[in-house]
Image (cartoon, coloured by chain):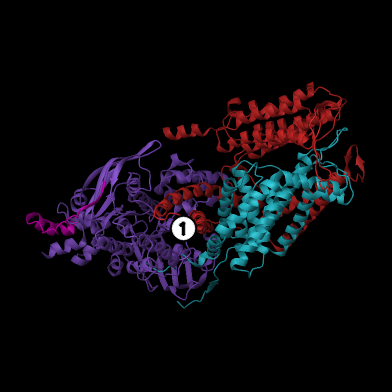
Amino acid sequence: MIRRYFLPRPLHPYVWWLWAIGLAVMASGTTNPLLLAGIIAVVCLVTVSRCGDNPWAKGFKLYLILGAFIVLLRVAFRIVFGGGDGPTVLLHLPTVPLPSWVAGIRLLGPVSLESLLYGLYDGLRLATMIICLGAANSLVNPKRLLAALPAAMYELGTILVVSFSVFPQLGESLVRVMRVRRLRGGQTTPKSRRRRLGVVETIIVPVLSDALDRSIALAASMEVRGYGRGGQASGAERAASTLLGMGGIIVLSVWSYFLLAQPGIGPHLGRVNVLEVGLLIMGVAGIVVAMGIIGRHVQRTRYRRDRWRLPETVVLVCGLLPAYLVHLVANGPDPSVLDPSIPQHQWPVVTGPLALALLIGALPAFLTPPPVLSTSTNNEEGLS
Amino acid sequence: MIRFEDVTLRYPSSDLLRLDSATFEIEEGELCLVIGPTGSGKSTLLGCVNNLVPRFTGGTRTGRITIDGVETTTLPTRELATTVGYVGQDPLAGFVTDIVEEELAYSMEQLGVDEAEMRRRVEETLDLLGIAELRRRPLRTLSGGQQQRVAIGSVIASAPKVLVLDEPTSALDPIAAEEVLALISRLVRDLGTTVLLAEHRMERVIEFADSMLLVEPDATVHHGPVRQILRQAPIKPPLVELGVRQGWEPLPLTIREGRRLAAPQRRDWTQSPPPLPPAPTAGDPVLEATGIVVEYPGVVAVRDVDLTLHRGEVTALMGRNGCGKSSLMWAIQGAGTKSAGRVVSDRRISLVPQTASDLLYLTSVEAECRAGDAAADLAPGTTAALLRSLVPTIDMASHPRDLSEGQKIAVVLAVELVGNPDVVLLDEPTRGLDYQAKATLARIIDDMAQAGRAVLVATHDVEMAATTCHRVVVMAEGEVVSDGPARDVLASSQLLATQVSKVTSPVPLLTVEEFCNAARG
Amino acid sequence: MPRVDDRIDIPAPIVGVRLGWRSWLLIAVSSFFGLFALGWPLILPAVDVAPDHQADAPFILGAMLPLILLLVLAQITDGGLDAKALAMLGVLSAINAVIRPALGAGTAGFESVFFLLILSGRVFGPGFGYMLGHTSLFASALLTAGVGPWLPFQMMCAGWVGLAAGLLPRRVRGRAELAMLIGLGIISAYVYGLLMNLWFWPTITGIGVEGVPAGSLDYVPGAPITQNLLAFGWFTLLTSTGGWDTGRAIATTLALLILGRPLLVVLRRASGMARVTTDVAAPAR
């Protein structure tokens, strides 16, 4: 049983995204630097243990760098553009006098601890959210993600599948053209600037022509193999999908206005604004049903579909539960633990429930089947 | 199984008739070979079977097409996906996905085959093609032959009744082509699939063919038994040509039949050997390459090769794919990497690469010619004049990419030759050329040699080497394994022997022409 | 057997994506939503409303927008996309995905060079350009692991660029055409940068809370429009308009100047290329 559960296989592509979004939501609800650092650690742990040796996993490092960059940028902004004159001034930088037409901008000036901390906390929160997304990007095979798109996205998915398979061919085509170009390049020394610029033309034009010629062959091959078979939607269905879709978008527009402008009107049920939530649900439902109608006529099946099994549910729970715990803490007796006060110099702490949330978030590193390593399949091929 | 009634077709861009009331019927389980010169409308005919022409390409078509008793004249191509499987020339360009397994499943996904059935059929197809160990490999890392087998597999996985193959081996080397053709003949024999096959390496499939379709340049179509159609065909494999010239009955289709028919002649020759045409004498050396080594990370492509090229001599460079032919040529030319060795030549060296069209980036043939003049500092029009002498029919205003393979090579050659090089290197110029285009190329090469140039041709084409080359160099694993006069190398080899020399062996005759001359005495 | 005249007459195919009135309607409505989702930090002060959720708005709206965009794309492709347009979109998206990291200093995909998108939109029409804008950025994000809440906004903006390129006056040719395309390239380079900054600005500069006064580049909810507009103006000028956006504009201009004409020829040929099958080419002698 346990053996079966832990058989190496890739998880359903959606599940890592849901887990990462759960952690990102958790991060969005706090500025506690310790908790945020904890989330980053959890995300790194899970990513490193479950991303395998796939090429798309290499992007994770870039996300970590981006996170650091965001934190630095936020702090630097505070210093350079004189953010937040708190009571505890650390550095007395001279204010650079600016001409009067640059109204409202202050360059340098005194730098306070509060201001820096504020930049650091908020930057860290944003960085954590970005790193969570980076984890999802690194854990999910983009091709499996495409394969799991809903039926209405069939054409879009196919376009992306095509560009995925063309991508490496372009590189090969480029290498070939560059190599061949040297044959002519040897004879013609670039005489003028114009001709030197023209060098780009001698590379890009053949590569592009080659790629476009291929695309016609590809289209023929797809046509021949039954791409786009199946019925067309009837007039009534089209009208319904358009109407529902449009209605959905309009309702969502109204919802987003309500959300951002917070008129606060409408009945409340506890702390929940019924009108706001109702609009969101209506809008999303309208769009989803419209897509369902569009996708109804796509009669295609999928080879080796990713299935939703127990480990998927475990990961999902491990992603959503921490966000819920943080939500509970935020509504509990001591919400300030999530946002340690800066003016009062409150020391950030991680309380029991928060530590538990981190622990749960880290569980997928141990409770999921390990990824399939490409080296192992190579060995298998070598043996057979 | 397939019935064409009075099918006539014309493309929207020209008034030229591409098919003129084609009427024929192909029985179930038949392998029908479609022949005709390039541009005669073979592809058009094949495209008509699943309505790719004119549905996809545009055009006006009249007449009626019935497949398996069902009229398919007006059906869209995709609705015919379960009936007709279609495989084109370049397998890589037709792949939708990038992994072997997924590609095999793609058509079934489109057809809505249910998951368990799909899995079963993919496994079966993998075994049928003998590529089970490649299932997870990215398609572009496969060899050409493997790619084409996957392409065939991806259409037969959905079990079509008819298989249409448009020159499936034109971009492959002989060994890969052999693999693919063996697979096709197995499909016909084991599965009873009806196959329509356009193939310019006719000699390899002729023995399996049940009938032949000849598409004439005037767009008329003839269907009939293999031997009958072959007699009236303008292009024939050397063995058949020999049979026709010698008046052999029945026409030999295989080497075995040929040897049996030639037995009396051979017996005469073993007693009194026929006079052989004298080997041409080589001129002065114009290029001496010594100790050439080409290394790529982890591979030694060329291993200490010495090569001397002589004025007026045409040398064939042969050997399987990846044996270092291209690397050697590029190293000699100077544009490619060279890890060690010396090339002594004060002459200009030109190289025509494998994919000639990579060198063509301007919008018309004329513009390319003008660029050629400018590059060589010659009077405008020199290159164009040279090109016309090579291929008089070429349309100077046309886009280089719209040219046929042979014409593209001619344009690149013209641009290269206008600089008056003394050494010309051709990297597999015969790929994708049919008999006629090859004949033109042979003439051009001959003219170059007459003009005193040294020519080195990398090729897999034994017949081409036999008719145009004076000397043959064979490479294997980066080393030269044999080097000598064409007759000695080709006639003594098992693998590189021409059809005629296989028939006459041990008498070293290479071409039909030589056989006929020798037989006349 | 009597002669049957089953005549099939198919005109020479032209590659493109047809936009029906339904698609136009959805594009318009979704663009409206998109503009609001991008521009609320300035729109709300303009109508004198103090916004809420400013810290997570980019993420919440970034979660809704993909749903809307996917619906629009599904609507456009529903019955309107033939295999040729699809293959062409796939190939061009791949090329754009190659160009993006190669020519732009991309950080999590915040950079994009539009010249091929503009040329393709010009040749293949507004529907194709709109689709290509979306698919190019989507493909590039998937290939470089750059999927995030910024992606739908980038896709939408790139879609607008492609759409605009397709809607430019058809008859203009030659130098004037190139100048027009370069103009569009420069405008879109700056507008794209501006919009992407606007999306991120309230979050990246943070929001003053708990008595800590805001920095002078920060978004201040509830402050008058002039103050926010000024702050944003300086923010965008300092962070990107002066640097990356100008770089992008120059790159796009240069690319269009050098490659514009030849690539237009290549693309135009491809747009009706099916006419010229290998068969039609004059036979070798």
Q: Position of residue C108 (x, y in %)?
A: 65, 41
Residue A233 occupies quadrant: bottom right
Question: Of residues B362 and C17, which is closer to you in this image?
Answer: B362
Q: Position of residue A206 (x, y in %)?
A: 48, 56
Q: Position of residue A198 (x, y in %)?
A: 50, 57
Q: Which chain is cyan?
A: C
Secondary element under disc 1, as helix, strand or loop, is strand
Q: Chain of mark 1?
A: B
Q: Is residue A19 above or below residue B205?
A: above
Q: Which residues are magenta?
A: B259-288
Residue type (three-letter) at the residue carrying disc 1: Tyr
Quarter of the image with the C terminus of chain B is bottom left
Quarter of the image with the N terminus of chain B is bottom left
Residue at 39% x, 48% y: name it: B145
Check the rendered structure and report the hue given to chain A. Answer: red
| Residue at which label 1 appears | B86
Question: Of residues C61 and B364, which is closer to you in this image?
Answer: B364
